[in-house]
Amino acid sequence: MPSTLLAIALLAVTFTQGGILDPSKLHGEWYHAYELPDGRTYEGYTIYREDGTFSDNSTIFYDGEAIDSIRIEGTWKLEGRQMTYKGKVIGHPSIPEEQPDVTCEITEITDERYSFKSPIDGSIQHETRVK
């Protein structure tokens, strides 16, 4: 399950419009809330920086109650529509720091949100820009 959480946490990607990549559209803060297959919700914020690094701070909820939190820091690499993330879990007592890389495919981008295929179940997920 830690790999599933990391995959969810790292699901923010850079953007493609008409085949032209524009990584600068990723820069800034994004909000996410994903339903996990086991009924939990993974909710939080990710910041993507111009230098290709990111940080994610999220809370895991079950039946509306916060049950855990996770912080991830790492880098991303863009190749075509595929974004690969390398992230480390920071200071969590039960999740190993080192995690496998996560890759997802961009499906749509606007100024307010972006969409991608979940590497966990193939569903389309979204993140919205924090103004």
Image (cartoon, grey):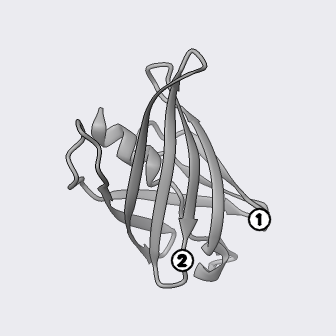
**Residue at far top of view:** 63
Say left or right for 112 vs 118: right
> What residue lies at 29% left-to-right and 43% top-to-bottom?
92
Residue type indicated by callout 2: Arg
Say left or right for 5 vs 26: left
Which numbered circle lies on residue 110?
Answer: 1
Say left or right for 101 vs 15: left
The spot of residue 14 in percent (x, y) is 56, 70
Q: Name the one closer to the observer, 98 or 23.
A: 98
Residue 111, quarter of the rendered image: bottom right
Q: For mark 2, what is the residue?
A: 49
Residue type indicated by callout 1: Thr
The spot of residue 120 in percent (x, y) is 41, 40
- Residue at disc 2, secondary structure: loop
> What residue lies at 53% left-to-right and 58% top-to-bottom?
12
Mark 2 neighbour density, 10 Å: few (under 14) some (14–19) many (20 or more): some
The spot of residue 50 in percent (x, y) is 54, 83
Relative to 112, does residue 124 appear above or below in the rendering? above
Q: Earlier in the sequence, mark 1 or mark 2?
A: 2
- Residue at disc 1, secondary structure: loop
Q: Give the quarter of the figure containing the N terminus.
A: top left
The spot of residue 131 in percent (x, y) is 79, 63
